[in-house]
Amino acid sequence: MAQLPSQSIPTLTPESPPRLEVRSVSKRFGGLQALKDVNIIHERGILGLIGPNGAGKTTLFNIISGFLKPTEGQVIFNGQAIHTRRPHQIVEMGIARTFQIVKPFADMTVRENVISGLGMPIYPRWLALVQRYRTPATLQASEAILRLTDLTVWAEARAESLPIGLQRRLEIARALATGPRLLLLDEPAAGLTAAEAEDLAQLIRTLNAQGISIIVIEHNMTFAMGLCHRIVVLAQGEIIAQGPPEQVRHDERVINAYLGQEDDNA
Amino acid sequence: MSDYVLSVAVFVGIWVTLALSLNILTGFAGQVSLGHAAFFGIGAYTSAILTANYGQSFWTGFALAILITGMTGAVLGLPSLRVRHDFLVLVTMGVNFVVVALFKYVDFFGGAMGIVNIPAPSLFGHTFRGGAPYLILVWVYALATLGVSWYLSKTWTGMAFNTVRLDEDAAAAVGVSVPRFKIYAFAISAALAGGAGSLYAHFIGSVFPDTFVFLESIAILSMVIFGGVGTLRGPIVGAIILKAAPEMLRFVQDYRFTLYGALLVLMMLFQPMGLLGDDSWLWTKLQRLFRKGS
Ligand SMILES: Nc1ncnc2c1ncn2[C@@H]1O[C@H](COP(=O)(O)OP(=O)(O)OP(=O)(O)O)[C@@H](O)[C@H]1O
Ligand SMILES: [Mg+2]
């Protein structure tokens, strides 16, 4: 499949943008072809990944973040193959993710959840055995992230006590704590009210303006169209369209793939 | 103190250490093990063989018991990288049976006759078997284990253990190498239990395979769960109560495994967080009392 040139979106950081290449990735679960020859290049900006239920969106995230190995194909990040690496190594390289079904550390406070992302990697490794995690530096860093994600007032609350919308935001905060260059967000707006979703969109734009590249999976077309610079549409494991929102919105195959799905997306 | 009270106090100290060490693996890192007595035994046999058969001093035996048991723990922890939860419980059980079988049927370990004539420790020319000095030694080690547990819970390793216990996927997503920290947990937990084994061996003067059987693993786990898994006070109080009671009440001694089993079931049903766990009935009451008082 022909690849679109990645767009040049002005960024505030002088660093060169991270470059993610998904090359001919396929994934089979037994007889089920969850992904088929998927090619994506993403550098800067906000990339939307949309598609009906079961299209393979989360599977693609699981492959990029190392939780699943592709059956075929490669994932290259900043010139290095990452599809052979383990999840924590991929985090070290600067890719962080959230989960569609939130996975906060339930027993910990919101602040501790954020601090958990600040620690690794530690070199030399044995330092992890003696170095405390609660230091002025980590408290300050977590404070900044809590402020950015608007979670400050919840800092001392147990993560499991938060309503789902805030847990989703906590997932983003925790991912940010790992210092990512690329952030993968799996349906961050699910279950949010319209107002909350707009706040979230604003947060994502802010993060992107700070130089973090973003790929966001989104069910809600309207939300994705308003947020993303470029959109990739997956259906039954295949990319059926990609391009700027306006172009994708009017693509016939996309409209067909979404026919009868509209109810879900309300 | 009578010899009897003294020896009960020594046993309690050793089992407090065992409970605290298992708590690092199960309470901190969330890896439920029903094989902890194996590590207790490996420490005891290491120290016993080095001193009784190879003429090493107690201190060498003790140090190597910690080291070798820790290394064995790292190796025996490998299955935890492949299996989780109930399957891991089964695997640790199996490991316990295998270790005891080796003690029993391999000549090097003395077979069913065990290892005897294990020398008492000596310090500055004084030899002490039992008595107040031994009691102090045992409790200093128990305190050291408590200190290690406490400090560990404040470190990145402690944080990593928490993340692994709460959600392995989320742990990996914050950059924690789940396999590495599982192995750390097994190694540290085993090493500390190995030291307890050495102290046991030199106190009794002999070791036999039957001391380190699977039932003992259940006993240690019961202490941790009864007191409150994951806390520091829980395993200490659990071990004190469940070890001292059978020692002091003869009629309980005969039924102690029944008691442990029954307690395990009752706690799981009614107070899974244990007697003194964070949200337990008793701990909540105590905290309220304390706050009123202050
Ligand atoms: N670990 C797995 N084992 C077997 N099948 C799987 C696994 N993960 C996903 N699948 C299957 O692969 C297909 C794609 O699933 P995936 O979760 O990637 O879809 P999705 O696009 O994220 O859908 P949704 O919008 O519902 O989240 C589905 O049919 C799903 O059942
Ligand atoms: Mg999904």
Image: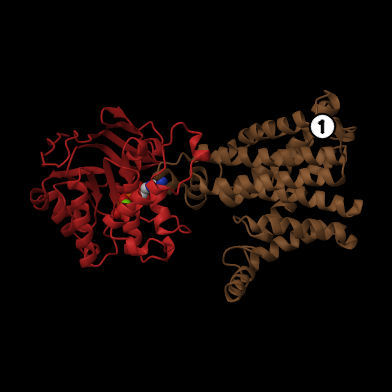
Chain colours: A red, B brown
- Indicate the position of residue B207 as horizontal and vertical percent values: 85, 37
| Ligand 1 contact, mark 1 (Cβ < 8 Å) | no
Q: Quadrant of residue B77?
A: top right
The mark tally for this picture is: 1
Position of residue B79 relative to residue A219, above or below, is above
| Quadrant, the N terminus of chain B | bottom right
What is the chain identity of the residue bearing mark 1?
B
- Indicate the position of residue A262 as horizontal and vertical percent values: 20, 62
Left or right: residue B184 compared with residue B275 = left
Q: Nearer the viewer, residue B224 or A123?
A: A123
User: For the point 53% across and 39% down, which residue is it?
Assistant: A129
User: For the point 70% across and 60% down, which residue is it?
Assistant: B264
Left or right: residue B214 compared with residue B152 = right
User: For the point 65% across and 58% down, which residue is it?
Assistant: B233
Left or right: residue A247 compared with residue A134 = left
- Indicate the position of residue A127 as horizontal and vertical percent values: 49, 36
Q: Nearer the viewer, residue A266 or A44?
A: A44
Q: Judge the density around disc 1: few (<14), some (14-19), many (≥20) Cα neighbours within 10 Å.
A: few
Q: Is residue A57 visible?
A: yes
Position of residue A35 relative to residue B233, above or below, is above
Left or right: residue A232 compared with residue A112 = left
Residue on which disc 1 sits: B124
Q: Nearer the viewer, residue B231 or A198?
A: B231
SS at mark 1?
Answer: loop
Q: Which amino acid type is marked by label 1?
A: Phe
